[in-house]
Every structure is written in structure tokens, then in C-alpha cells.
Image (tube, coloured by chain):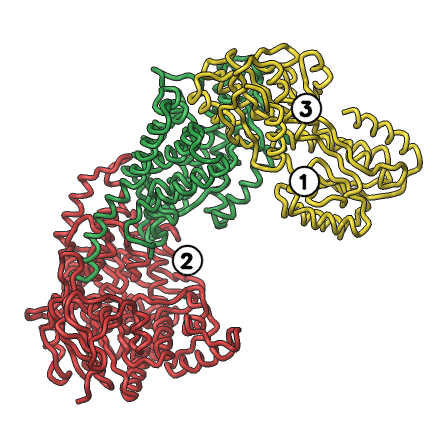
Amino acid sequence: MTDPILSLSDVHKSFGPIEVLHGVNFALRPGEVHALIGENGAGKSTTMKILAGYLSQTDGEVIFEGNPIRFDHSDEAEDLGIIMIHQEFNLAEHLAVDQNIFLGRELKKGWRLDHGEMRRRSAELLQRLDCRVDPATQVNRISVPDKQMVEIAKALSRDARVLIMDEPTAVLTERETEVLFEQIERLREQGVAILYTSHKLSEVKRIADRVTVLRDGTMVRSGMVEEFSEHDMATAMVGRELSDLFPPKAEGGAETVLEVRNVSVPGMVENASLNLHRGEVLGIGGLVGSGRTELAEAIAGLRPRDGEVTVKGTALPPGDISAAVKAGLVYLTEDRKGAGLLLEKTLRENLTLPLLSEFGNPLINRRKEEAALSKAIEDFAIRAPDRGMAVGDLSGGNQQKLLLAKTLLSNPEIVIIDEPTRGIDIGTKQQIYQLIADLAAEGRSIIVISSEMPELIGLADRVVVMHSGEITGEVSGADVNEQRIVKLAMGMDAEPEGTAA
Amino acid sequence: MKITLVATTALAGALALPAFAQTIGVSIPAATHGWAGALNYHAERTVERLEETYPDMDFVLTTTSDPGTQVSDLEDMVATRGIDALVVLPFESEPLTGPIQRIAESGTWVTVVDRGLAQDGIEDLYVAGDNMSFGQTAGQYFVDNLDSGAKLVVMRGIPSTVDNERVEGFEAALEGSDLEVLAMDHANWNRDNAFTLMQDYLSRFSEIDAVWAADDDQAVGALAAIEQAGRSGEMIVVGGAGMKEMVDRIRNGDETVPVNVTYPPSMISTAIEMTAVGASGAAPMTGEFIIASELITQDNAEDYYFEDSPY
Amino acid sequence: MTDATAKKPAARRSSVNLQAIGPVVALIVLVLIGISLSDNFLSYANVTNVLARSAFIGIIAVGMTFVITAGGLDLSVGSMAAFVAGVMIIAMNAMTERMGVTLPVVLLGMLIALFSGFAAGMINGLLITRAGIEAFIVTLGTMGIYRSLITWLADGGTLSIGYQMGEFYRPVYYGGIAGISWPIIVFALVAIIGEIAMRHTAFGRHCAAIGSNEKVARYSSVAVLRVRLITYALLGLLVGLAVVMYVPRLGSASSATGLLWELEAIAAVIIGGTLLKGGFGRVWGTVVGVLILSLIGNILNLTDFVSPYLNGAIQGVVIILAVVLQRNTGPAR
């Protein structure tokens, strides 16, 4: 076994009076992919930030090549080749891809910037990642997975010796994930030490050499990946036996509550039609960028559209979200931080925002708001150390639960949930799945959009699949399986129009 | 004032001769306060009148609110309108000296109005009011008419050369007298600022015998504050520049406003007219014309009251 | 819990306190300085003067608080005030000719001022929300337009209200109830209503939500464009109200009226703790900010503390200090 390049020895970390890491021991070795797994809030991010010099430990040591080291700034770590790719991208949105890749380390010809060389090298790096983005494109124009690739290209350009990746695959499709893994394998061969976190345990199994499980700031298990089954990992993370992840599927009634006819969003969705029955969980599958989100947003009145959307016989005007909400149709966004929650505001302010008029007019009844929050915290099992805290300080899972509570506040009959469990730990996932099943059992109708195949298959009784803006088919009952959905999603099994029941 | 008359007479005579076709550029500050407003009023009227009388003559009138724009305006005039003569009231002396010098060197006739350039000998003609005399006239009036030991407060304008010269003249007149200046602060030639400043002077000093507001806009603000405090009659207020309302009060024998000091905005008319004559070579018009400030009293107020002037 | 969950609440709580008292501390310090430097500082006349002269900027700044909280900006309020004052004076002079010096003329004049302000604010708001032009550009444009219009209306000079009418209208600035002058009463009412609207109504909450993250607000079915529009229209209306109190003071308007009021109003809002980028607003803080700005000028006038040439520097230092007092976390990240 090679010697560790970077390790933590009995590291403690406190924020104010609260200790979040209670003595973590941990070693990264050259040419090894090390997966760090744990529930949200287990201390993964803190551990990674200490390794990459963004935070300094309260106690214990960080050891680089055998010598204790203390970083005052992440730049010092970067100079040693320790590079971290953040879950929220660190890209300058208004600069071009190549400008981002070489940001702060611009190549120069004399005193002038060498644009040609930077562009050429960027193109080369992106090519290695099988990413077709033009290096001259502005970053705010490229898709989320492409941004991830740019981040990785940026790390590659720095000759990383230690690469720390915080959930790099959360926003990638399976194909893109595969490309990323090829790169990771290549880096591993070159002797780079890689630390990697993910909530997708199958990926961990697939790519990691070594696994460390954190729970509540303590290292509970560590070993070679062969020693773990996925089930072992999940159990170690949660600290208890996990029963079945998915509750039994609900079968919808006959009554059609939502009818979508020939809905088009220019350039995004073409002639999409579907029906939703009472008490049913309908899945919408397809690759990222296939128009799923755009279709949902068009239905919910968040985008201009052509075509008809009818809720229980009443047509909804396009582009009018309040009309949709009034008709009992709500949409839960996939972009939790960008479009779902006000991160600097408190839980209470977020919860009641869509329905303020219900909390008193003209003056808001604070007590009524607090009561609603108490109810939401209880109903959705939201874990917040302090009711007055900013939502941005909550863990991802708790944010998602709050977003659910907020979206469901108006007691809607139809709920469209886009990526219900993105970036969420397995324990919370299970709670959310149960919640979706409960909603359906109460007679509400649910549409679930997901990139995670098991999620679609586990939740939905019927799945509509989209491919480049069009609905390519629908599967139901026993046909809801990975093979069928993937084929439709790739556009390989297109059925004629009008299959939607 | 007298010189204005002389010049106008000369012009009337000179222009009886057939004038050359020529373009005259006029660049003055925008109407950001009362006096500048009157300046604009007089400039426009003069230009209109001359254009009507002498169709061959062409005028380019621009107004600016900062020195930078004024420089660009001047460059545009030379480049695109090919002016033969320039009448300019420089926004500030220093930054405009260079650009005006280049215009003068290219052979264009240059008349500078009111604010002198930083370097002598550039302009063909200099027409100006006398800021020293403006301050001195007011100061002299106080020395002559106030009881010994009287207490004064002074409102200054926007910190600038003009303001400094006026205050210098005022202080020179007061020298050797036993009048006491309690305080001197800037009210920026603005009514609202003057109102506020006067309120605070009134809170601060229980005894004030006279206010030198130095400008009639400032005097309006000061008077309103004095009235609000119920201390009218305790003090006199002397403004400056001959605003219509002030001259009217003097004419009617107002106790609080006994006199005013002139600083005629009509000097721009004089300058334009003299330039028209001088640049055409019809009559020799080079040199300096300094228009001294005069005291307006109840006796001569009628001569300084212009019904249809905006100021 | 997460690293984040654990670390921030503690820091946040203490910062909230300091943020809240920062401007108040600055105000108290200024009052103490005033008392120590001048015997007349606390006199009835001086206190009344300072409060009354704060009223114009204050009333406008309350409206500005909502605009800035919702992530907007309005640079046109100073010019708008001058323009509205000009329109009001011209209208009142015209009406006086026909109807004489009567109460209806004053009331109509006030209505015209309020309406013109409201209309001007609506124009800003519509250009920003419907035409989708940056608030900075729109209001920079209208700032120049209104400033030119007043200069044009006044023919480069000063518009004055007829003498008799002026005397009749005068008490609206100089009069009052129980020794408290009208501008102070109106300012106080506007501030109290504004504070309630900001903290306890859906409108205030919506402004903060839009300023914090417009997309989240839109996805939460907040009528983003309408709320934005209302903030500008409301600000315009308050400019009209400020003009109603301003005109009787000197009875005139010129191109120098309301010069730099927009910057003073914005400065007051920021000193008060409202975030310039939007998302959080505090009306009572704005009131404290306005008083701080007024007091600096007042103290400098009451004393020979520094050369008058340095007045601007003192103001600048106090403004920056008042804001620094609110930041206990070092440089903003």
C-alpha cells in the first residue's frame, strides 16, 4: 500500500459552541478513489473543506506527505495540488468557458493574454471529458452538467495531485456520469488521490476503491469497497436497518383531474399531451434537457405556452401561476436554491410566502404563521436547530422538506414534483417517498419528474417518457422497467402519437 | 453698466456697415441657478435679436453643466460649425484655459466672459463683472450704515474663485471697522440650503444685526427662515445680483432689505454684441471691459427693475 | 447537523443585534456631540427645525426603502420633486387667477401634486416592469428629463407662487398641532404606516422576497411585476406628498430644487440597514438614517467645529461609520 499523501488525524471541528466533527481519521492515497459517504449533515462537507484548506480544524492535524500542515487559505492548498470541486459551482457566470478554466492563472504572451492558447488548451481539456461545449461560450449559457464538466476541466488544468469532489454526479445524467468516471479512472492511473462523495451508492460501489462512512461527525466505518454491499453502506449511514425504500404503489382512480393537450413551449416542448387521474402517481422520465421541466413549468403557468391545460374541466390561462394555484395545481421546482427557497430568510417567511393573503389581510397574523410553521415542522419532520435561522443554513434534506411543506401549504389537489430527492441523503429520501405515497392515498394526484430511474420505477404506476421536447411514449404497470424507459428516453422506441391514456 | 451702453452704441454704428457673413459660437453654463438662468435669458434674446437684424450672421449657442462637456462643446463648434468667433463663459478657469488657447491660436476670435482664464493674453476681449467690487460694495454699505459693534453672519456660495473673490472684497471693506462676523458658511447659491443655514444661525446666535446673503437666491431662503423665527425687524439682509423680487422690495422701502448689489447677467449681451463688431473688424473692440458692481437703493431701484426678466 | 446549520445561527443572532442598533448608536453619538458643542442644540426651535427639514427627504426615503428592498433603485426622485413642485405652482397660480385665494385652490393643488408624483412614479415603474429596462437606466433617464422640464417650465429661473396664495398656503409648512409642525406629523405618520407595511403586510413581505430572489418569488406565485410597479408608484406618490409640504416653505421651485435628494434618500435608506442589493428593508432604520444626515448638517452649522470646506468630508465619514457599525463580520463576502 502506498503512503498517504493527505490525511486527517483525530480532527475536531467546532463552530461556536457546537462541535460537528468528533475526531476524524482519514487518509487519501495516490492512485486511489476514496468515497466519503454519509447522510446530509454527517460532516462530509466540513471534512472536505478542512482537507482543501477552506476551513481549519479546531483540534487534531492535517498531514500532507507526512508533515503536519496548516492552511490559512485554500490557495495554499491549491498550490500543493489539492483541488476541490464544489457542489455549488465556483464559476464566473458572465465569463467564457476558457476564461473560467484559466481564471486567476491566465496564460500570457509577454504582458498580453494569450487567448488563442487558452482557448486551444480548454478545447483539449473539454475534449478529454467528451464535453462538446465551445470554450468561447459564456458560462451562463451552458447547461448544469456542462458546468460540472467545466469545473472538472478547470481542476484537470491545474495538475491536481489530490482532487476532492463534492457530489459531482448529482446533476449529471447517467451517460455524463459514465464520462466522468472514465476521467476519474484515468486520473487514478496517473496517481492522483481522489476523494469523492455521492448519495448514489451504486456509483460508489462502481468507482471507489475505499469507502469511509460518516455519521453525526464520527467515522463509523472505513474499509475497501469490497467489504461493503450497498445495503451495508446505507445501514452504516443511517445507523439502523432500512426497510424497503419505496412504499407500495398507489393505483389511481378513473377520474381525470388534469388534462394536457398539445402543449408547446417554443424550442423546448412540442405538442405534449397527457392525462392525470385522481390518486395516481404519474412519472415523467427522460434525460436532463429533454423538456420535462419546461413542460411542467408550462402546465403550472410559469412559462408561456401554446395548447390547453384543463384542471377538472376548467381551462387554465397560460403563464398565470396564480390561476393554477387557485385551481389546485402546484409545482415544486427542481432548483431548490435558485427558485424554491429564499436562502437568507427564515423558515416562517419561506413557508407562508405563496399564501400570505391567507395569513391575514392587510396585517399578517404572526401567530397564525408560527402555528403553520409548527405544524409543518411536525408533519414533515423538519429538523431545524433554531426556528429563526436562515433557510440557507439548513441541510439539503431539511430544505427539501420545507419546500414540500411550502408547496403543499395551499392544500392542492395536483402536485407536480420535479426531482423530489436531488442531493438528499437516503434517510430523508425514504421519508419523502412515503410522503408522496401518502399524498396519493389522500386522493391527491401527483406527477413526479426524476432523472433517477429507480425513483421513477419505485414510485410511479405509470410513466410518460420524453425525448428532445416530445413525449415518446408511456409505460404502465408491469412495463415500468428500466429497459423500456431508457429506450424511450433515447428516442429509440418512439410510439405513434396519442398513446397517452 | 455705462460700458454696456457705450458698446451698444458702438455696435449700432458699426453694424450699419455691411457685415461679413460669420458664425459666432456662444458657450455658457446651463441655467442651474437664478443668475445663470438670467444669463441664458439674455444670451438667447441677444442672439435672436442679432440673427433677425443681420441674416448673414449665424450663432451657435450651447449650455453646459460641467467643464468636461464644455470642452467637448467647444471642440464640436470648431470642428463641425467652423466658428469665426467664440464667446465663452468658462465653467472653471483651469480646465478650460488649454482648449480655449488652442482655439485662439487657430485664429478664431475669442471673447471670455466673467470668469478669467488661468493665463493672460489668450482672449481678444474680456468682459466681466467685478467680484471684488461685488463683495466690497456690500461690505462698505455695512460699515457705513451699521452701528459700531454690530454682529454679522455671512452666507457664502459654492466654494469657487468667484465666491473667494467676493468674500475677499467683503472682508477688505470690513477691515478696520469694529463690525463682528459671527460665522461664515456655504449655502451654495441655493434657496433651500440658505433656509436651513439661516435657521441654524438663528438657533445659534441670539443677536444678529445683519446678514450678507451674497446672492438673492440665498437671501430668499434667509428671509423665510427669519420670518419663521419671528425675528423680522431685528436684522437687515443684503443679497446680491439684483433679482426682480429683491429690487421690488427695495423700491417699496422694505426695512429688512434696504439695498442690493448688482452683478448684471446682461453682461453676456454686451459680450456677444461687442464680439459681433470686433470679429468682423468693423471697429476695434479688443481689451478688457470690467463692469463694476453698484449699490441699488430705494432711490435708484426703479432703474434696475425689469418687468419681463425671469430674474 | 450540518457544518452550516451549526455554525451560522450563533453568528447571525449577534449580528442581528448589532445591525439593529448600529444606526441608533450613531444617532445617539451625534446627539451627544451636538449637546456638548452647542447650548442651543436641544432648544425647541432647533429640534423642530431639524425634524421639519428632514421631512421631505424622510417621506421620500420611506418610499425608497420599499423600492430598494424589492431590488430596485430610483435616481429620479430629486428631479421629480422639482418637476412636481413646478407643476403644482403653475397650476395653483393659474387657479388662483380664476378662483382667488381660496381653500379649494390649495386642496386641488395638493391633489395635482400627489397625482403628478404618482403618475411620474408609474411611468418609471411601467418602463422598468413592462419594457424591462434596468431601473438604473430608466431613472437616470427620467432624472435628466424632469430636471430639464423644470428648468424649461421656469424658463431657467424660479417659479414662485403668488404672494397672497403663498401666505395662505404657508401654514402647511410652518403651522401644526400642539407645537408640532405639520411636516413632522406627516413624516411620522408616513414612517409609522411604512414600518407596519414593511413588517406586517403581504406587500412588505413580497418586496423582501422579490429583492432576495426574484425567481423564488415568481415560483411562489408572487405577482412580481405588480409589486415592483407598486413600489415605484408609491414612491412617486410620496414624492408628491413631500412636495405638498415643501412648496409652502419658500413658495418656489427652480432647477436647483431637490438637487441630490435622490442620493440623500438612498444614503439614508442604506445607513438605516436596508440592503442596497435588496431582500431586506427596515423603515425605522431609514428614519434614523435621515435624522443622522440632517443632524450632521445641523451640528456643522451650529459650530465652528471644522472649516466649512470640510463639511462634505465629515458627512462622508459619518455615513461610512454608520454603515460600518452594522457590519461586525469584517469585509462582506
Q: Nearer the viewer, mark 2 or mark 3?
A: 3
A215 relative position to A75: left or right = left
Chain to which the residue tagged by mark 1 belongs: B
The amino acid type found where label 2 is placed reads Arg
Label 1 element class: strand
Whether labels 2 and 1 belong to a single chain: the reply is no
Give the Cα distance between marks 1 and 3. Answer: 23 Å
Mark 1: amino acid: Thr
Residue A376: % across, % down: 16, 50
Q: Position of residue B95 (x, y in %)?
A: 65, 47
Residue shown at the point (37%, 58%) measured from the top left: A298
Of all chains in the rendering, the one displayed in yellow is B
Q: Could you tell me the amino acid type at mark 3? A: Thr
- Say left or right for B256 vs C287: right
Local packing at callout 1 (Cα closer than 10 Å; few below 14, some 14-19, many 20+) is: some
Chain coloured red: A
**Above or below — where is B174 with respect to A183?**
above
User: In this view of the protein, which residue sits in the foreground, B20 or B188?
Assistant: B188
- Identify residue for label 1: B63
Q: Colour of chain C?
A: green
Tell me the SS state at disc 2: loop
Give coordinates of residue A439: x percent, y percent. 17, 57
Residue found farthest to the left: A240
Label pair 2/3, CB-CB below 8 angstroms? no
Label 3: element kind: loop
The quadrant in which the N terminus of chain B is found is top right
Please name the residue that numbered disc 2 is placed on.
A305
Q: Residue at x 58, y 17 (%)?
A: C162
